């Protein structure tokens, strides 16, 4: 049989597009993934100790987009959840994003009073300021506070995570976690934040349950004969698609180290960051994320690593101009393939997407499909 579409990658991007093509166009889809499970990096499962874990690090769903929220709500109910993160700094567990309570914890009362007054006067109550902007402020007093925060929380964490200091990366990376002039200690402030009630994997199963979608796991793209499909959607990395003809696109990888402990709770927040100590960046205790009640607990440490194709996973595109240029060059190669190819997703777009952004991108791409691909 020839499928109308082959979709490579069964993560948020691939599952969303498969679902749209099947339900809206009534066309057939062969959805493949080389991994043995659905869901891409958002996949979850029971670990050997009966604890629900996220297989590729903590995944918290949050969005400002009503459209994305409504779309996914057709496939899952939700459990309201607010993610809270602490960082261990100078032996103290301080709120992250760095807020007024973090400043207070690390300062003498007099230093806190003068620093908070200066910041609130300059930016206003409740402001959220990216650390790199704070460091460039014209007031030397504010720059001194920025340097203090930078060194306590951002510099070493970013070196560990990316192998580069914050100012050598696109400013959008550290702007994800701005300095916050309030006591709000939620990690995300989007209006919609929740976890799929019975997990991500069941949500993906419902997204692809149409009889028009054939799911094949453990299936790398190169194993699918070209005669089996008319059109291609590709959500993997473009350098791999072109056999690294222009060189490897740089990604950052992680090693996840899970440990099961015979205690109810290991730590006082879902995630604890270790900016200045340890080789890992953070520890996440999965039970906070999933809401599971169980006598034991599983924690996951994240050890950043350079990406080596074929050895570990390309988790983070590294947003630097030279890398974006190389990605553009690979994009320009797409029309040289033997049939229409749509490339999307965190890997193929080479963009630091959150889950909702991957869904929004897939929905927008579907809406913009030209008429000739809709029949
Ligand atoms: P992916 O999930 O990467 O899926 C791509 C799939 O394609 C993979 O399953 C891969 O196996 C498959 N594939 C690739 N090449 C081939 C091939 N040649 N043949 C067959 N299959 C192939 N987002 C949030 O919103 N909140 C969070 O808290 C959050 N935490 C994160 C934590 C970590 C550690 C990481 C790495 C990401 C996190 N994200 C988070 C981002 C989130 O994982 C992504 O936005 C989302 O998974 C992107 O979906 P995708 O389908 O584009 O890509
Ligand atoms: N960051 C930091 N210290 C922290 C938390 C974050 O320096 O305690 C920086 C770091 O560069 C990190 C970026 O902010 O890569 C984005 O953090 P986020 O938690 O959004 O990263 P992700 O969950 O995507 O790994």
Image (tube, helix red, strand yellow):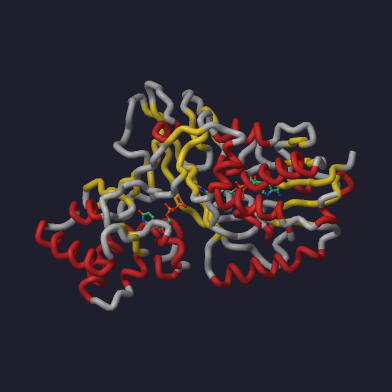
Q: Residue drawn 85% across and 42% down?
A: 3
In the image, taking residue 204 as reference, residue 220 lies left or right, namely right
Quadrant containing the N terminus in the rendered view: top right
Residue 7 lies, in percent from the top left, at 74, 46
* Residue 355 visible: no
In the image, taking residue 10 as reference, residue 144 lies left or right, namely left
Q: Residue drawn 63% across and 59% down?
A: 349
In the image, taking residue 175 as reference, residue 90 lies left or right, namely left
In the image, taking residue 247 as reference, residue 123 lies left or right, namely left
Between residues 115 and 322, which one lies in front from this camera angle?
115
Q: Residue drawn 50% across and 48% down?
A: 63
Residue 369 position (above or below residue 119): above
Residue 370 lies, in percent from the top left, at 79, 58
Quadrant of res 163: bottom left
Residue 375 lies, in percent from the top left, at 85, 49
Residue 206 lies, in percent from the top left, at 65, 32
Residue 33 position (above or below residue 98): above
Quadrant of res 337: bottom right
Q: Residue drawn 82% across and 42% down?
A: 27
Residue 348 position (above or below residue 137): above
């Amino acid at each position: 049989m020839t499928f109308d579409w082959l979709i490579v990658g069964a993560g948020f991007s691939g599952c969303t597009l498969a679902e749209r093509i099947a339900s809206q166009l009534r066309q057939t889809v062969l959805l493949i993934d080389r991994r043995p499970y659905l869901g891409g990096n958002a996949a979850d499962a029971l670990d050997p100790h009966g604890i629900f874990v996220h297989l590729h690090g903590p995944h918290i769903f949050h969005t400002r987009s009503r459209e994305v929220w409504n779309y996914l709500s057709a496939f899952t109910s939700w459990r309201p959840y607010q993610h809270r993160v602490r960082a261990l700094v100078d032996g103290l567990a301080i709120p992250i994003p760095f807020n007024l309570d973090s400043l207070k914890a690390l300062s003498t009362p007099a230093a806190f009073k003068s620093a908070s007054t200066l910041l609130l006067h300059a930016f206003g109550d409740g402001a959220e300021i990216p650390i790199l902007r704070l460091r460039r402020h014209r007031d030397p007093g504010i720059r001194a506070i920025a340097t203090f925060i930078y060194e306590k929380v951002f510099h070493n964490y970013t070196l560990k995570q990316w192998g580069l200091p914050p100012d050598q990366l696109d400013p959008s990376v550290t702007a994800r976690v701005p300095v916050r002039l309030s006591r709000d200690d939620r990690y995300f402030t989007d209006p919609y934040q929740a976890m799929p009630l019975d997990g991500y994997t069941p949500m993906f199963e419902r997204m692809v349950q149409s009889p028009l979608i054939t799911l094949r796991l453990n299936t790398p793209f190169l194993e699918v004969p070209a005669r089996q499909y008319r059109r291609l959607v590709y959500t993997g990395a473009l350098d791999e698609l072109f056999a690294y003809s222009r060189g490897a696109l740089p990604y950052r990888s992680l090693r996840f180290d899970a440990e099961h402990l015979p205690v109810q709770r290991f730590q006082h927040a879902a995630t604890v960051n270790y900016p200045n100590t340890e080789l890992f960046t953070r520890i996440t205790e999965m039970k906070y994320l999933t809401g599971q009640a169980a006598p034991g607990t599983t924690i996951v440490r994240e050890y950043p690593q350079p990406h080596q194709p074929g050895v570990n996973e390309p988790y983070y595109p590294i947003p630097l101009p030279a890398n974006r240029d190389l990605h553009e060059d690979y994009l320009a190669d797409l029309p040289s393939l033997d049939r229409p190819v749509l490339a999307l997703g965190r890997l193929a777009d080479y963009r630091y997407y959150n889950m909702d952004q991957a869904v929004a991108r897939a929905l927008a791409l579907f809406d913009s499909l030209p008429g000739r691909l809709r029949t």
